[in-house]
Every structure is written in structure tokens, then in C-alpha cells.
Image (cartoon, rainbow, N blue to C red):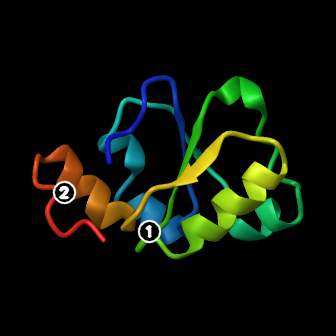
Amino acid sequence: MTLPEGATVIDLRPADLRAAEPLGDLTTLPVRAVNLQAIEDGAHGLTPDLGPLVVICERGVRSGLAARYLSADGLDARAYPGGVPALRAALSGNEAGGN
């Protein structure tokens, strides 16, 4: 899966993982760190003007739940399947086995 033009990437990973491999190093799209609890509580502060939201976590499990909550809030949100390893593989041109 490629990242759509004009999207905002939502990074669900914990702070230590975000610091170890910032998603801003993998894409030029804007990246926002938001935790799953804030999304579940509706306290995420995300708005439609951010464009489509691509939610990513470490392995692709929590991002699906987060995308469903964000969609229920009226946002255009989708999970990135396979998490950061799949994104890294897609950007390097090796999309095989991305889940």
C-alpha cells in the first residue's frame, strides 16, 4: 500500500518506538503522534482538514481499531496494513509479505 498524496500519517506507537524510528524519516507526509486511548476517548484533536488519515502502529493490529474509531468520528481514516515493517518494505520497493 502506498501513502496517498495529501494524507496525514497518524503514529500510534509508544514514544520509545517513535524516537527509535521516526516516521518522518520514512515519508515527507505530515506525521502526528496520537495514542489509542485519546482516539478511543474522542480526545485526539484530529480534524477533516488534515486530509485522509493513514493510521500506523508497530505491527498493524491497533491501527485497525483506531481507524474504525476515527471513521466513526466522521474522519477519512484507514489503517496501514502490516505496520511500520510493511511501510518500510513498501517504500524500499519490496512490498511482498507486507502483512
Front residue of 3 and 57: 3
Where is residue 19 drawn, in percent x and y? 43, 60
> Disc 2, disc 1: CB below 8 Å?
no
Q: Is residue 82 left or right of residue 40?
A: left
Out of 61 and 84, give the one closest to the viewer: 61
Closer-to-camera residue (22/30): 30
Examine the rendered structure and indicate whether residue 99 appears above or below residue 69: below
Nearer mark to the viewer, of 2 and 1? 2
Q: Is residue 50 above or below residue 21?
A: above
Q: Is residue 28 above or below residue 64?
A: above
How many marks do you count on the picture?
A: 2
* Figure quadrant of residue 26: top left
- Circle 1 — which element? helix
Give the left or right position of residue 35, taking residue 11 as reference. right
Q: Looking at the rendering, in which quadrant would you find the C terminus? A: bottom left
Provide the residue designation for mark 1.
17
Query: Circle 2: is it few (<14), some (14-19), or many (20+) Cα within 10 Å?
Result: some
**Residue 98, image quadrant:** bottom left
Q: Earlier in the sequence, mark 2 or mark 1?
A: 1
User: Can you give x and y, in whole percent of width and height, for residue 90 in the image?
Assistant: 21, 50
| Amino acid at pointer 1 | Leu
* Distance Cα–Cα, label 2 vs label 1: 18 Å
Is residue 76 positioned above or below 56 on the image? Answer: above
Mark 1 residue crowding within 10 angstroms, few (<14) / some (14–19) / many (20+): some
Q: Residue at x 67, y 63 (%)?
A: 66
Q: Is residue 66 left or right of residue 39?
A: left
Left or right of residue 79: residue 90: left
Residue wearing tag 2: 89
Looking at the rendered structure, the secondary structure element under dot 2 is helix
